[in-house]
Image (spheres, rainbow, N blue to C red):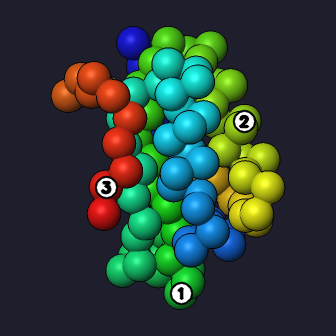
Amino acid sequence: MKQVRLYVKGDVIGVGFRAWTKIQAKAMKITGWTKNVYDDPSKFGEAGGVEIVAQADEKELGDFIEKVKEGSPVSRVDDVEVLIEKVSQHFDSFDIIK
């Protein structure tokens, strides 16, 4: 099992991006979480962005990252920073953190 942390920049807040991400993750058997981030302009810019932690096998994670880079039909993804992390906690589902 592998883990990545994604920092998604663009028009991704207020357009259902987290819910869309959860649907994609569930379909691909990805576990982890997603949340909006407003208070870290060094990573997301002034408008904020979405942070995602995802766990799965390498192929599934690669497919998921590509899907996130495409974005949902009503979002605009400008950039996705991908950080590979050591798995320190195992997740049983994919959740939206408020």
Classify mark 2: helix, strand or loop: helix
Q: Please give the name of the residue rendered at 55% of the width and 84% of the height, measured from the top-left corner.
A: 47
Q: Does 9 sit above or below residue 72?
A: below
Q: Are marks 2 and 1 in contact (CB under 8 Å)?
A: no
Q: Please give the name of the residue rendered at 53% of the width and 32% of the height, measured from the top-left corner.
A: 25
Residue at the spot of label 3: 97
Separation of marks 3 and 1 at Cα, in angstroms: 21 Å
Quarter where residue 93 is shown = top left
Residue 17: percent from the left, percent from the top? 59, 58
Which of marks 2 and 3 precedes in the sequence? 2
Residue found farthest to the left: 89
13 horizontally vs 89: left or right: right
* Mark 3 or 1: the one toward you: 3
56 horizontally vs 77: left or right: left
Residue found farthest to the bottom: 46
- Which label was assigned to residue 46? 1
Give the residue type at disc 3.
Answer: Ile
Give the residue type at disc 2.
Answer: Glu
Residue 62: percent from the left, percent from the top? 64, 25
- Which label was assigned to residue 75? none
Residue at the spot of label 2: 66
> Where is the C terminus found, in terms of image quarters?
bottom left
Q: Please give the name of the residue rendered at 27% of the width and 23% of the height, measured from the top-left corner.
A: 92
Neighbor class of circle 2 (other Cα within 10 Å; few <14, some 14-19, many 20+) is few
